[in-house]
């Protein structure tokens, strides 16, 4: 049977990246092999994101292009391309997608990917089959994991938790990913062992609220369990909510060498008035104290954050409170967003929607400050020797790229055999996004 070609385009967060890999895994036994472009693909899956308006709109413009591509190919006597929409737009808009873009064959929500083989078969029999995506996360993982996961490279994402019960007033995730749900520790351990056996050295545990992980002993216990697996040398996790950052997890950062000193801890705003309107359940003060506690457990930890500017009702003084929180915390890196009005969320109906021009201006000021901090953080590594896990060849011949414990990309001249190894690198240069260094040769020769 000739291989069928599968193209998956992934939008949004790392959980979608993980899900896209799992979709490829469940489709492989049906003869689908991945391709790099949609041209010539038999099945195209858009794994979508609903978080901001732009993310959603991108999907529809991409669908328009795919429709044309399919028509051209059919006119030339080629085979028919099946078009599927997965991910959070699929969950949020469901059949609305089929109405808006009749070229779509399948709509499949994030909890229904294990049903893909059957859905595709059905759609090939009867075009335009409509699907309902239900929340049955345990079923999803049970069905996807034993399919046999193929690891690529020395780092891997590993979803341990899905969904969100927090209902921040700006956010669609509780509606697209459903209630908080945690996988069983044993299933996660089995997946991690399998990854380690395939050469994976670093796992990043994923969840919309990963530190709300509710398996026995919480995320700290899970991290300890995974750290004991031979071959797993580094553990990261993302994304955390400040309110779920418990003492056991904070302590683990000081005790568990495998737990990397990097924490993505979104704060969204530095104004208590805005935080309250956002339903964040933390204040600027409690967040700053929390970061202090984490830093007393692990002093060198790199903190990263998410920020929203222009939430409804945000005044200049609120925005300045965000700037002063940023100055107080000191971020290694950060993600910043202009508030995007999402249909169905409470904030979309709030008074005091902020002008785009004001959002632009605040975003630029916030980015300038965070940029300065990121550069300073990177520059502070120059002269130090950091353990770097080399992941892949760099752009220049003879060069490898890896990651520091703080998640910075590090380039160094190094032989390919060091891919998958953690090697000491003396840092010589720093830029906004990456570091450059040289191998510490004496230590290497001893290997
Ligand atoms: N669960 C995580 C992040 C989920 S979404 C958390 O609680 O932080 C990732 C980021 O997108 C959020 O942290 C937030 O900064 C941003 N975001 C979510 N909804 C948004 C909206 N409507 N407009 C702008 N940014 C948004
Ligand atoms: Fe969205 Fe808030 Fe849940 Fe994060 S915690 S996913 S921002 S509702
Ligand atoms: Fe986007 Fe869904 Fe992730 S909305 S950010 S893909 S959880």
Image (cartoon, rainbow, N blue to C red):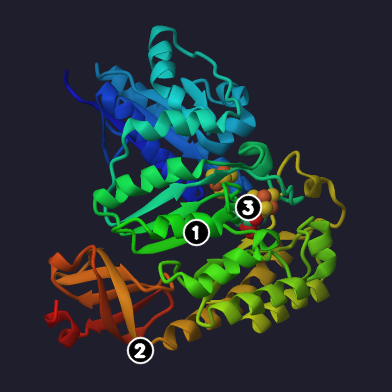
Q: Earlier in the sequence, mark 1 or mark 3?
A: 3
- Disc 2 + disc 3, Cβ < 8 Å: no
Picture layout, residue 151 above or below residue 421: above
* Residue 274, above or below 38: below
**Where in the figure is residue 48, as x and y percent of width and height?**
51, 39
Task: Rate crowding at label 1 as few (under 14), some (14 to 19) or many (20 or more) other CA atoms within 10 Å.
Answer: many
From the viewer's side, name the closer residue of 65 and 416: 416
Looking at the image, tell me whether mark 2 or mark 3 is earlier in sequence order: 3
Q: CA distance from mark 1 to mark 3?
A: 11 Å
The secondary structure type at the circle numbered 2 is loop
* Dot 1 or dot 2, earlier in sequence: 1
- Residue 237 got which mark? 1
Quick one: which residue is furthest to the right in this view? 351
The residue lying at 78 percent from left, 47 percent from top is: 348
- From the top left corner, tell me how far across and down residue 115 is, in percent: 45, 22
Left or right, 186 with respect to 347, comes to left
Q: Distance from label 1 to label 2 (Cα)?
A: 25 Å
Distance from Cα at disc 2 to Cα at disc 3: 34 Å
Task: Tell me the SS state at disc 3.
Answer: helix
- Can you identify the residue that label 2 sits on? 384
Quick check: can you spot residue 238? no
Quadrant position of the C terminus in the picture: bottom left
Of the numbered discs in the image, which one, if any, rests on residue 212?
A: 3
Direction from residue 421 to residue 92 in the image, left or right: right
Q: Which of these two is toward me, 330 or 313?
A: 330
């Amino acid at each position: 049977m000739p291989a069928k070609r599968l193209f998956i385009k992934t939008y949004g967060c790392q959980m979608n990246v993980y899900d896209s890999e799992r979709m490829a895994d469940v489709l492989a036994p049906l003869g689908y092999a991945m391709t790099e472009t949609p041209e010539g693909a038999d099945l195209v899956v858009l794994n979508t994101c609903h978080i901001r308006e732009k993310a959603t709109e991108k999907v529809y413009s991409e669908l328009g292009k795919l429709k044309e591509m399919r028509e051209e190919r059919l006119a030339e006597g080629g085979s028919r391309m099946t078009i599927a929409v997965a991910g959070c737009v699929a969950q949020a808009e469901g059949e609305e997608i089929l109405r808006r873009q009749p070229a779509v064959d399948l709509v499949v929500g994030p909890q229904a990917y294990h049903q893909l083989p059957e859905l595709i078969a059905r759609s090939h029999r009867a075009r335009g089959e409509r699907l309902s995506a239900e929340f049955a996360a345990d079923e999803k993982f049970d069905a996807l994991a034993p399919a046999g996961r193929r690891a690529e490279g020395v780092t891997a994402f590993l979803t341990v938790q899905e969904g969100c019960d927090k209902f921040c007033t700006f956010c669609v995730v509780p509606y697209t990913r459903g209630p908080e749900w945690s996988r069983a520790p044993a299933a996660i351990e089995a997946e991690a062992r399998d990854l380690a056996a395939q050469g994976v050295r670093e796992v990043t545990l994923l969840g919309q609220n990963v530190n709300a992980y509710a398996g026995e002993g919480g995320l700290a216990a899970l991290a300890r369990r995974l750290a004991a697996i031979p071959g797993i040398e580094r553990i990261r996790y993302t994304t955390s909510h400040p309110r779920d950052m418990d003492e056991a997890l904070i302590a683990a950062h000081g005790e568990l060498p495998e737990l990397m000193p990097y924490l993505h801890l979104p704060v969204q705003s530095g104004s208590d008035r805005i935080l309250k309107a956002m339903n964040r359940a933390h204040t600027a003060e409690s967040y700053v104290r929390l970061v202090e506690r984490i830093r007393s457990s692990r002093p060198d930890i790199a903190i990263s954050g998410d920020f929203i500017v222009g939430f409804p009702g945000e005044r200049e003084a609120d925005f300045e409170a965000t700037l002063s929180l940023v100055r107080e915390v000191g971020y290694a890196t950060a993600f910043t967003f202009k508030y995007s009005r999402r249909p169905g969320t409470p904030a979309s109906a709030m008074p005091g929607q902020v002008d785009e021009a004001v959002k632009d201006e605040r975003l630029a000021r916030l980015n300038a400050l965070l940029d300065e901090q990121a550069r300073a953080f990177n520059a502070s590594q120059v002269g130090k020797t950091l353990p770097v896990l080399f992941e892949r060849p760099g752009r220049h011949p003879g060069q490898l790229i890896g990651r520091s414990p703080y998640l910075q990309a590090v380039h160094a001249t190094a032989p390919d055999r060091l891919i998958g190894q953690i090697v000491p690198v003396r840092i010589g240069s720093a830029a906004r996004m990456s570091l450059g260094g040289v191998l510490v040769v004496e230590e290497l020769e001893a290997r």
